[in-house]
Amino acid sequence: TFTKASAVSGDAGVYSCVVTDADGTVITSSDCTVTIN
């Protein structure tokens, strides 16, 4: 879960999460579309 206080319309978009472990293995999540109402 990620929470951002005071989100604004410019924060909307497509995001993904990239994690790199100590061995250098990289895992990228699926894209997530964020909308601001």
Image (cartoon, rainbow, N blue to C red):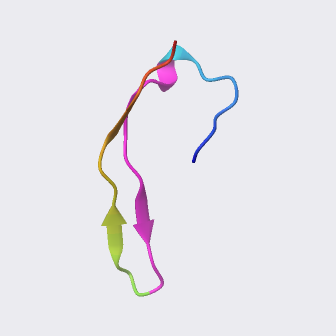
Q: How many marks can you see? A: 0
Q: Is residue 36 above or below residue 14?
A: above
Q: Residue furthest front?
A: 1
Q: Is residue 17 above or below residue 6?
A: below
Q: Position of residue 2 (x, y in %)?
A: 58, 44
Q: Which image quadrant for residue 31? A: top left
Residue 19 falls inside the magenta stretch: yes
Please tell me which residue lies in front, 24 or 27: 27
Q: Position of residue 34 (x, y in %)?
A: 42, 29
Q: Is residue 16 above or below residue 25?
A: above
Q: Which image quadrant for residue 25? A: bottom left
Please tell me which residue lies in front, 7 or 1: 1
Q: Is residue 2 left or right of residue 28?
A: right
Q: Residue furthest bottom?
A: 23
From which residue to which does the magenta span run? 10-22
Q: Residue furthest right?
A: 5
Q: Position of residue 32 (x, y in %)?
A: 36, 39
For image coordinates 64% across by 34% down, the residue present is: 4
Q: Position of residue 18 (x, y in %)?
A: 40, 59
Q: Is residue 17 above or below residue 12?
A: below
For image coordinates 48% across by 84% down, the residue present is: 22
For image coordinates 44% across by 21% down, the residue present is: 35
Q: Is residue 31 left or right of residue 22?
A: left
Q: Which image quadrant for residue 19? A: bottom left
Q: Residue furthest left?
A: 30
